Image (cartoon, grey):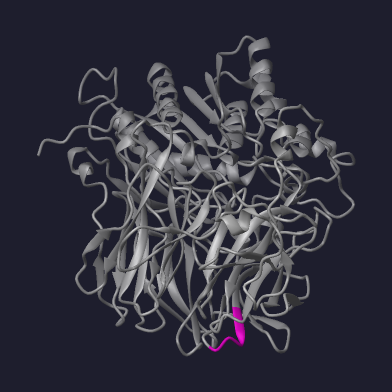
């Protein structure tokens, strides 16, 4: 088959896989496959069920709606779907057939799990403190009639049907009152005063009862093996500058919650042990603020105590920290217990790879899934010992794999994106280099298979684009990145790597950029670039572009203000001014403090010079590199005023600069944004580099 280079519109052809969930007996697993909708105005997803023994996957749903797997049990697959408008929970029989709607809650639900005892569903819903939840207009008649409803066993706040006054209120503009620091969030906008709370729903009648209420969010939850208890994480401290999430255990019969932790850890993703006596969580003591590596903690419910699993001689974070533009926000489970409770299965990020290992209570680590790839979600059957996981590598956007109970034999279960055989894939090579202080750094170089536009002969040297990742506490990994392949298809070599501040190289490394943005991290990036230029003599050191998003956008802005060696730059969803960022970003009031590494007595007002010295805007007079600014209108993480300030300053100084604003796009445009706008973003970037590099 003759292969041709990638084109931007190939984005519309990709298939993305969601988190797999294994059946209780371990013989099958379900997963979602997401594609761009036929009208290209969004995305759609369908559910498949794979048989472990035969390797056959069977489609279970279809249509232009989004289906996500929330849970799986002997009674069927619990779906979260927007097929009725708001996202509601559905039960899809494992024997096949139509999905049956279970919840009819106005505003929908955000998560769901089947009670192991059967008969009811646990759900998360959003509601104002003290209010009673309304049902949708298409709910069963007994729900629409209002009144108290119960399944006869649960206690808590009854859910009632409300009137139609909300519709009348929406016709009139109303002021928005701000009383707290966290009043907005990227992706969801201004906070509407609602909290995420836990409720139960009867599988037969759809009657619901609220189990938690108050000025707090229930973040994540799980059910005990007997269905009598629910563990959940929540931050009860009303101070928005407090970040410890505690672990609670709720008795379903009484709706009473007991706090298990001591408000000295930020805990997430709880999972009960097989005997129901313990709970495993991911957690952080936040010693290094947002740069603290994630660990696993085990809670003893009866003792109300937590202990940290301490893997011997293990330096890495127990999390999947890789980055790619081919996915976003997949659900990943918490640490999963083995059948005997002696170990948990969890991911870890190390040197550009994300792997899976069993972490034992005695400190042993047994890696079971490794290699030059990134595992980004997984599930495990304690009954059989089989592991299903989704992974990517530089030539593969994603596929599902099954590791047999022997934990040696691995089978690939899906063959997504077979159309990639029609395209020329640029090869990727990893390399190591020593930084200025001897610190080992990791980089990658992707070489194009054809010359760039404007090259007169095959003998011409290859122009280069340097990529800088966001975070900064994340990492480039052995993953497929469509943006890089598109640049290679246009004839550019792509160089990228992990400067200090990145995950995957130990706690000291990930913490090393805090308080030093634009310092050693900047020099690391230049070292990675220079090492690639030295290792590949065909690269053209006189024709280099640079780009990055978020922290990578900050670094792009910083680079062009401190060197003129680049022929062009594209800055995306960036920070240009730390002084204003502190007050306008949804996370600015604490992220600025964390990343500046301030002590308790320092504030933006007592140390404004430090903010200004680390702001790329201070150095705009030195910018000579043609700069393209790409930014989403609805970005609340790095608000668009950061781009506006940079553009105005450069335009007033008569610098070469252009500014593109993407409507209805937030900070995740490059990963989950509108498909057509993602394609346009690729176009602007590629054409800018073709024009100037």
Query: Toward which corner of the image does residue 131 lie, by quadrant?
Result: bottom right
User: Of residues 529 and 657, which is closer to you in this image?
Assistant: 657
Image spot of residue 497 (x, y percent)? 46, 47
Seen in the picture, residue 313 relative to 492 is either above or below; the reply is below
Residue 125: horizontal and vertical position, in percent? Answer: 64, 56
Q: Nearer the viewer, residue 546 or 674?
A: 674
Residue in the image at 48% along x and 31% along y: 546
385 lies above or below 478? below
Residue 328 in percent (x, y) is at 48, 48
Quadrant in which the N terminus appears: top left
Left/right of residue 243 with respect to residue 118 in the rendered view: right
Q: Which range of residues does the magenta coloring cover? A: 275-279
Out of 655 and 241, give the one closest to the viewer: 241
Task: Name the magenta segment's main secondary structure.
Answer: loop
Q: Is residue 282 visible?
A: yes
Q: Quadrant of the C terminus?
A: top left
Q: Residue at x 26, y 24 (%)?
A: 460
């Amino acid at each position: 088959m003759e292969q041709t280079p990638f084109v931007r519109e190939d984005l519309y052809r990709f298939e993305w896989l969601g988190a797999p969930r294994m059946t209780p007996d371990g013989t099958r697993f379900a997963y979602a496959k997401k594609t761009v909708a036929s009208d290209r105005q969004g995305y759609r997803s369908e559910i498949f069920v794979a048989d472990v023994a035969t390797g056959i996957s069977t489609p279970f749903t279809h249509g232009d709606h989004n289906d996500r797997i929330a849970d799986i049990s002997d009674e069927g697959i619990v779906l979260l779907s927007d097929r009725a408008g708001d996202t509601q929970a559905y039960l899809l029989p494992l024997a096949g057939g139509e999905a049956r709607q279970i919840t009819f809650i106005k505003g929908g639900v955000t998560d769901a799990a089947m009670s192991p005892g059967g008969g009811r569903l646990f759900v998360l819903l959003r509601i104002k403190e003290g209010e009673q939840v309304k049902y949708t207009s298409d709910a069963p008649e007994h729900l629409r009639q209002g009144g108290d409803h119960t399944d006869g066993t649960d206690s808590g706040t009854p859910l009632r049907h409300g009137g139609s006054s909300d519709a009348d209120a929406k016709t009139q503009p109303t002021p928005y009152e701000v009383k707290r620091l966290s009043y907005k969030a990227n992706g969801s906008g201004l906070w509407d005063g609602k909290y995420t709370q836990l409720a139960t729903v009867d599988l037969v009648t759809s009657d619901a009862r609220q189990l938690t209420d108050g000025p707090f969010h229930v973040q994540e939850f799980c059910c005990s093996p007997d269905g009598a208890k629910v563990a959940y994480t929540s931050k009860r401290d009303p101070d928005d500058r407090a970040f410890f999430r505690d672990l609670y255990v709720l008795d379903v019969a009484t709706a009473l919650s007991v706090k298990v932790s001591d408000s000295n850890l930020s805990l997430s993703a709880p999972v009960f042990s097989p005997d129901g006596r313990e709970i495993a969580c991911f957690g952080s003591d936040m010693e290094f603020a947002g740069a603290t590596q994630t660990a696993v903690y085990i809670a003893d419910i009866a003792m109300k105590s937590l202990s940290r699993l301490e893997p011997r001689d293990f330096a890495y974070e127990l999390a999947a920290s890789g980055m790619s533009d081919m996915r976003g926000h997949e659900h990943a489970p918490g640490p999963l217990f083995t059948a005997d409770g002696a170990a948990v299965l969890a991911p870890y990020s190390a040197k550009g790879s994300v792997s899976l290992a069993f972490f034992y209570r005695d400190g042993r680590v047994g890696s079971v899934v490794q290699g030059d790839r990134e595992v980004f979600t997984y599930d495990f059957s304690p009954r059989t010992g089989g592991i299903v996981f989704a992974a990517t590598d530089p030539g593969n956007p994603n596929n599902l794999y099954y590791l047999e109970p022997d934990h040696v034999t691995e089978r690939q279960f899906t063959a997504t994106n077979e159309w990639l055989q029609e395209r020329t894939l640029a090869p990727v090579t990893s390399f190591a280099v020593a930084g200025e202080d001897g610190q080992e750094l990791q980089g990658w170089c992707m070489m194009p298979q054809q010359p760039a536009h404007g090259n007169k002969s095959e003998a011409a040297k290859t122009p280069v684009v340097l990529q800088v990742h966001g975070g900064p506490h994340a990492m480039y990994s052995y993953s497929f990145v469509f943006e890089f392949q598109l640049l290679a298809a246009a004839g550019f070599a792509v160089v990228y790597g992990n400067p200090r501040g990145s995950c995957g190289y130990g706690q000291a490394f990930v913490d090393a950029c805090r308080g030093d943005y634009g310092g050693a991290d900047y020099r690391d990036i230049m070292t990675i670039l220079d090492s690639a230029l030295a290792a590949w003599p065909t690269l053209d050191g006189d024709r280099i572009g640079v780009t990055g998003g978020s922290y990578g956008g900050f670094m792009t802005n910083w680079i062009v203000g401190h060197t003129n060696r680049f022929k062009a730059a594209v800055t995306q969803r960036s920070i240009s001014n730390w002084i204003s960022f502190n007050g306008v970003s949804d996370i600015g009031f604490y992220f600025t403090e964390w990343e500046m590494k301030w002590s308790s007595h320092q504030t933006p007002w007592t140390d404004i010079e430090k903010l200004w010295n680390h702001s790329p805007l201070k150095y705009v007079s030195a910018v000579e590199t043609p700069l393209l600014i790409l930014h989403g209108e609805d970005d609340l993480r790095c608000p668009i005023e950061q781009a506006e300030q940079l553009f105005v300053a450069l335009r007033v100084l008569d610098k070469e600069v252009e500014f593109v604003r993407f409507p209805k796009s937030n900070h995740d445009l490059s990963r989950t944004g509108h498909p057509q706008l993602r394609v346009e973003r690729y176009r602007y970037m590629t054409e800018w580099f073709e024009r100037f590099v």
